[in-house]
Image: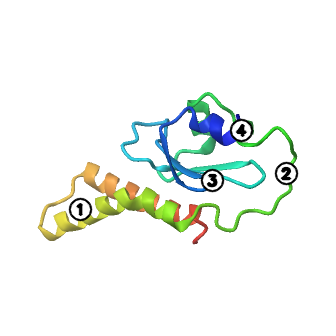
């Protein structure tokens, strides 16, 4: 079993392309698949949570270590990925956060004041969108 298969066997996921998947992040009650996995040609895998949890937190939650992201052979001296996650995957992962921002804007236009919880959720959505742009290599 390769690194990607080992990880994917432990999370709910769907394939989005050749060597690319989205997964439900196991570190929280994730209603949407906000994690992305990409398998590189040399067998290494990249994972990213567009919700903000770290790779080590995610790997620990599924009973794996960061070393499990890499095939047994090594060490690696490859060049860094310029755009580690395709724009389509980034957009799929932030679609829900965009809806949160739109709902907040509609509420404000209708004259509904925000409470502290509303403000925190809006700031979280904006933070996740910004992190997604960075993770996609677009910033």
Identify the residue at image location x=24%, y=62%: 104
Q: CA distance from mark 4 to mark 2?
A: 17 Å
Q: Nearer the viewer, residue 97 or 117?
A: 97
Q: CA distance from mark 2 to mark 1?
A: 45 Å
Circles 1 and 3: CB atoms closer than 8 Å: no
Q: CA distance from mark 1 to mark 3?
A: 34 Å
Colouring of the image = rainbow
10 Å neighbourhood of mark 4: few (<14), some, or many (≥20)? Answer: some
Which image quadrant: the C terminus? bottom right
10 Å neighbourhood of mark 3: few (<14), some, or many (≥20)? Answer: some
Q: Which mark is residue 14?
A: none
> Toward which corner of the image does residue 55 lie, by quadrant?
top right
Residue at which label 4 appears: 2
Q: CA distance from mark 4 to mark 1?
A: 42 Å
Q: Residue furthest top?
A: 63
Tag nearer the camera, 4 or 1? 4
10 Å neighbourhood of mark 2: few (<14), some, or many (≥20)? Answer: few
Dot 2 or dot 1, earlier in sequence: 2
* Secondary-structure class at tag 3: loop
> Toward which corner of the image does residue 99 lie, by quadrant?
bottom left
Tag nearer the camera, 1 or 3? 3
> Toward which corner of the image does residue 58 lie, by quadrant?
top right
Residue at which label 1 appears: 103
Residue at which label 2 appears: 76
Identify the residue at image location x=44%, y=47%: 33
Dot 4 or dot 1, earlier in sequence: 4
């Amino acid at each position: 079993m390769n690194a990607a298969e080992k990880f994917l066997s432990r999370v709910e996921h769907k394939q989005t392309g050749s060597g690319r998947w989205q997964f439900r992040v196991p570190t929280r009650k994730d209603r949407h698949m906000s994690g992305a996995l990409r398998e590189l040609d040399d067998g290494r895998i990249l994972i990213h949570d567009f919700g903000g949890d770290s790779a080590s937190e995610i790997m620990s939650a599924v009973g794996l270590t960061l070393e499990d992201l890499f095939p047994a052979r090594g060490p690696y001296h490859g060049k860094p990925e310029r755009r580690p996650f395709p724009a389509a995957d980034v957009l799929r992962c932030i679609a829900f956060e965009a809806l949160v921002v739109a709902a907040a804007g509609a509420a404000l236009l209708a004259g509904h004041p925000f409470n502290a919880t509303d403000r925190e959720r809006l700031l979280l959505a904006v933070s996740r969108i910004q992190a997604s742009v960075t993770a996609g290599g677009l910033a």
